[in-house]
Image: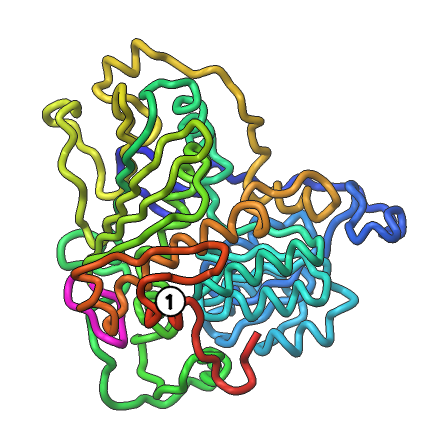
Amino acid sequence: MEQKNMTRRGFMGAAAGVAAFTVVPRHAVAGSGSAAPSEKINIAGVGVGGQGGHDIGQFTDQNIVALCDVDWRHAAGCFRRYPNAKQYKDFREMLDKEDKNIDGVVVGTPDHMHAIVSMAAIKRGKHVYCEKPLTHTVREAKMLADAAREAKVATQMGNQGQASEETRLQSEMIWDGAIGQVREVHVWTDRPLNGINKWYWPQGVDRPKGEDPVPETLDWNLLIGPAPMRPYVRSVYHPFVWRGWWDFGTGALGDIGCHAMDPVFRALKLGHPVSVEGACTLVNNETYPVASRVTYEFPARGDLAPVTLHWYDGGMKPPRPPELEDGRGWGTNGLLYIGDKGKMLGSRLIPEVRQKEYGKPPQKIERSPGHYVEWVVACKGGKPAGSNFPDHAGLLAQVVLMGNITLRPALKDKMLSTKLFWDADKFEFTNMPEANPYLTKEYREGWAI
């Protein structure tokens, strides 16, 4: 990551549009479960009013055959861009009616619907592109990874920066020994804040009183989905501001963690942590805290040393590294590696004189054709995408979302005096059984996976 503010658009910098292909008959690869390399794939989108609509826009050289959104006013712009695509409010109806016409599904719904929509598509043998953080709960992330592996479908999570040059440089520099053994990493974001007293979305607030009429264009029941029903209040939950609510989103950690921690997982070859602990500002049962800090501890991996990974949000940051030159900014979003032989801020050694002395590492990683292109190639039977569910995204999302469990109000008092110890084989926290129910959630009747 660069030493400047990190935005969603920044993470997409390396992503390119999908190249056009000459259409050949689908039976050219009969029995393979994939489209021919030269054939366009038929794509449906679910949740296309915001980021999902942007994602669909990266596949315009493919066939956009169906679009689904619970709010047709919010999705109107996307609908207009693809007038030949069938329009739906309920993704289940779309999958039923368009089953034979769909090869892949792009999921851009609020977090609490990611797993439900993705799993429904996977069970039908559809390829899936799903926005980060992949799922709402830790268990859902494991379920999706397992299901995608069994179904042998092409998948990709929407952490666009994984395809970038910078992500590869970080790995190559660390593998080259540029800073020695890495034992500590700090990752930070300003989310949910956007400057002083400005919000990307609110957190640390209680549920509002009152109720507003539901707009005719919005199906509130479908938006609520698996969450407990609550009254509609204008501009409180929809659109986008759902992210700070426990029932719908995954807070700042879920929003940015799968972006910002991705290069760390790759460079340091991380797996499951052995422990996780958190601390935060005041928290309630409705929304995530305004600011939090989560610490993950990872064991040694072969000849790689144990690593402590510190996460900060709400504008909090680690202490300024003394190697950073006076007057040099280091961003409200960033990543700092601390090794035995030096430090690296994003993909640059500090101080800058060290970077100039070092230059570039030997190239060891194949460069990406683009984040979105990767998924299309995988759908056509090519190389798996870089953030596919079974090999990468499922684990990354599980670990990221574990951090949110440490912020739960019901566990806060106990978390002040201990940390959660994780047993990956048993898929449970071994020292605090009351934390384990938060690995999953209760689903409203009719919405279980």
Q: Is residue 148 above or below residue 2?
A: below
User: Extreme left residue here?
Assistant: 326
Q: Give the percent coordinates (x, y) of residue 404.
A: 32, 61
Q: Residue at x 59, y 34 (%)?
A: 369
In the image, 385: left or right of 442?
Answer: right
Q: Residue at x 58, y 27 (%)?
A: 366
Q: Is residue 381 above or below residue 302?
A: below
Residue 141 covered by magenta stretch? no
Q: Is residue 441 above or below residue 171?
A: below
In the image, 316: left or right of 164?
Answer: left
**What sort of colour scheme is used for the picture?**
rainbow
**Crowding at label 1, few (<14), some or many (≥20) Cα neighbours within 10 Å?**
many
Which sits in the foreground, 33 or 49? 33
- Per the image, the residue denoted by label 1 is 249
Type of secondary structure dominating the magenta stretch: loop
User: Extreme top residue here?
Assistant: 357
Q: Residue at x 30, y 90 (%)?
A: 211
Q: Give the percent coordinates (x, y) of residue 237.
A: 34, 75
Q: Which residues are magenta?
A: 280-289
Tell me the kind of residue under disc 1. Gly
Which sits in the foreground, 210 or 81? 210
